[in-house]
Image (spheres, rainbow, N blue to C red):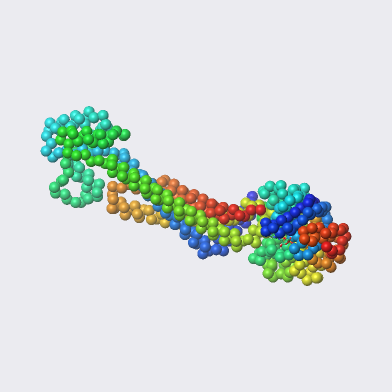
Amino acid sequence: MRDSARGLSFHVQEALDGLRQAVVMNLATLSTVAITLFILGSFLLFMRNMNENLKLLRSQLQLTVYLKKEITEPQKTELVSRLQGDPSIVNYRFVGRDAALKTVKEWMGWSDFEVRDNPLPDSFDVKLHEGVDFDAFVSRAKSWPGVDDLSVGEKEVGALIKLLDLARSVGLVLVLVLGTASLMIIANTIKLTVYARRTEISIMKLVGATNWFIRMPFLIEGFLQGLLGAAIALALLLTGYPVVVARLSGIAPFLRFVTDSADLFRLSWQLVLMGVLLGLLGSLISLRRIAV
Amino acid sequence: MIQMYNVNKVYPNGVKALNAIDIHIARGEFVFLVGPSGAGKTTLMRLIFRDELPSTGHVIVDGRNIERLNASKVPYLRRSIGVVFQDFRLLDNRTVFDNVAFALRVTNTPYDEIQDRTNSVIDLLGLGHKKQFTPLQLSGGEKQRVCIARAIVNNPAILLTDEPTGNLDPDMSVEIMDILAEINKRGTTLLVATHNTQIVNKMQRRVIGLVDGRVTSDKAKGVYNY
Ligand SMILES: Nc1ncnc2c1ncn2[C@@H]1O[C@H](COP(=O)(O)OP(=O)(O)O)[C@@H](O)[C@H]1O
Ligand SMILES: [Mg+2]
C-alpha cells in the first residue's frame, strides 16, 4: 500500500513539476481548453433548450381554424358536424375572440396592455392526428362553411427544425475545429515538457523504466490540464447560464429553459469528460515518440 | 553472459560501425575494449543494452536474443545491465542520493528497499558524506562514482562503462578502476571501453582491440594494443 502510494506520488510530483516549469505555456493551454469547453458547453445548453422548446411546440401541434365574422348559426352547426366527422382530427375546441386575445397577450407578455378593438375572430383550435396530410386537410377545411382562414403552425415548426439542424451543424464544426486546436496546443505544451526532461527520460530508459512509467507524468499533466480547463469552463457556464436565462425569460416569456439540476449535472460531467479526454489524447499525441 | 555472432551494424546514415564481430564474454569476466576513436566501442556497448539493434547477426545477453526481444521486455533487460557514460548524465537539480535512488524509484522498487540499497551503494563508493550534495558541487571523480553507484544500485549482472576515466586525472582514474575491479570481484560481468593505456597495462585483464569496427586482437591478460 505504502509503496504504491509512493510510486503514485513520484508521478504526481513529476506532473506538477511539469506544470510549474512552463507556467505561461500552461496558462495559454489552459485558457484554450477552457474556451473550447465553454463554447462546447454553451452549444450543448443551447441545443438542449431548443430541443425542449421544439418538443413543446410539437406537443401543441394544432391548427387554428378562423371563422368569418359574419358566420351564421346554421353555418356554425354545419361546421361543428364537419369537425366532428373528420377522420384527421383528434379533438377540437371553440375559442371565443376574447379568450384568444387573452392567450395572445399572455404569450407575448403584454398582459398589461389595453387592447381596444380586438382584431381576433372566433376560432376553433384543432389538433390533428400525427402523420395526416397537412395540406390536404387545409384545402379541405377551407371549403367548409363559415371558415375564413387557417393558421399553418406546422410550417413554422418545420422552419424551426431546419434552423436547429443548421445550428447543430455549425456548432459541431465549431466544436471540432476548437477541439482539434486544443488538442494540438496540449500536445505542444507537453512536447515542451518532454523536451525539458529529455535527460531524465533518457536516464529512465537507461535504467529500465517501462514506457508507461515514463509516460505517466505527462499523461497526468495532460489530464490535469483537461480537468482544470473543464473546471474553469464549468464555473463560467454555471454562473453565466442563470443570468442569460433570466434575461431571455424577460424578453421571450413563451420560451422554456432547461434549469433542472439533473440536466445541468449531466452537462457538467460531459464537459469534464471531454476535458479529460482532450488532455489525455493531447499528451498521447506528444508521447508517441517516447518508446524504447 | 554476452555473445555476439557475426554482428554488423550500419547506421541509417550509411556508416558501418561494426563489421563481422564475434565475441564471447563469460559470466564474471573483466574485459577492456580498446581502440581508436570511431572504432565502434560505444556502438558495441549500445547493442548490449539494446539501445541499438544489429543490422545483421545476433546479440545474446544473459540468454536473451536482443533482436527478438519484445519491446515490453526491453526495460527488464536493462534492469540487469548497468551503464556508465563518460559524460556522466546526472540530474543536476537532484542530490547525490536522489540521483542514485532514481534508478530504483523508476523501476517500482519498494520504498524501504530504495532507502537501504541507495545508502549502502553510496557508502560502498565512499560518498556517504556527500549524499545531500548536488552534482554541481562534486569533482569529476565523485561524479563518476555517483554514476557507477546509480548503475549498480539494482545489482545488475553486467556493468558497461564507456570511457569512465576519460574526463579524470590519473589519480582519480586509478581510484575509479579500483572500484570497478571491486565490483567485478563481487561477480558482476564488466566491460570497460577506454583509452587509458597505463591502466589497461597495469590491470592485466582480457583486452579486446577494435579498429574500424573489426576485432583486431583479443587476449586474456593482455596489454593496451589494437
Ligand atoms: N548514432 C549514430 N549515427 C550515425 N553514425 C554513428 C552514430 N554513432 C556512431 N556513429 C559512427 O559509427 C562509428 C563508430 O562510432 P562509436 O561506436 O561511437 O566509436 P567509438 O566509441 O569507438 O569512438 C563512427 O564512425 C561514428 O561516427
Ligand atoms: Mg565512444
* Among the 4 quarters of the image, the one containing residue B152: bottom right
Q: Residue at x 79, y 58 (%)?
A: B214
Q: Residue at x 63, y 61 (%)?
A: A198
Say how many tags the image has. 0
The extreme top residue here reads: A85
Is A15 drawn above or below residue A116 in the view shown? Answer: below
| Residue A251, image x, y percentages | 28, 53
Task: State left or right for residue A175 relative to residue A140.
Answer: right
Is A162 drawn above or below residue A203 in the view shown? Answer: above
Viewer can see residue A200: yes
Q: Nearer the viewer, residue B212 or A226?
A: B212
| Residue A141, image x, y percentages | 21, 34
Q: Nearer the viewer, residue A167 or A100?
A: A167
| Residue B208, image x, y percentages | 82, 59
| Residue B198, image x, y percentages | 84, 68
Q: Residue at x 48, y 56 (%)?
A: A181
Ligand 1 quarter of the rendering: bottom right
Is A240 drawn above or below residue A71 in the view shown? Answer: below
Task: State left or right for residue B80 relative to residue A258.
Answer: right
Q: Residue at x 75, y 63 (%)?
A: B38
Q: Nearer the viewer, residue A184 or A20?
A: A184
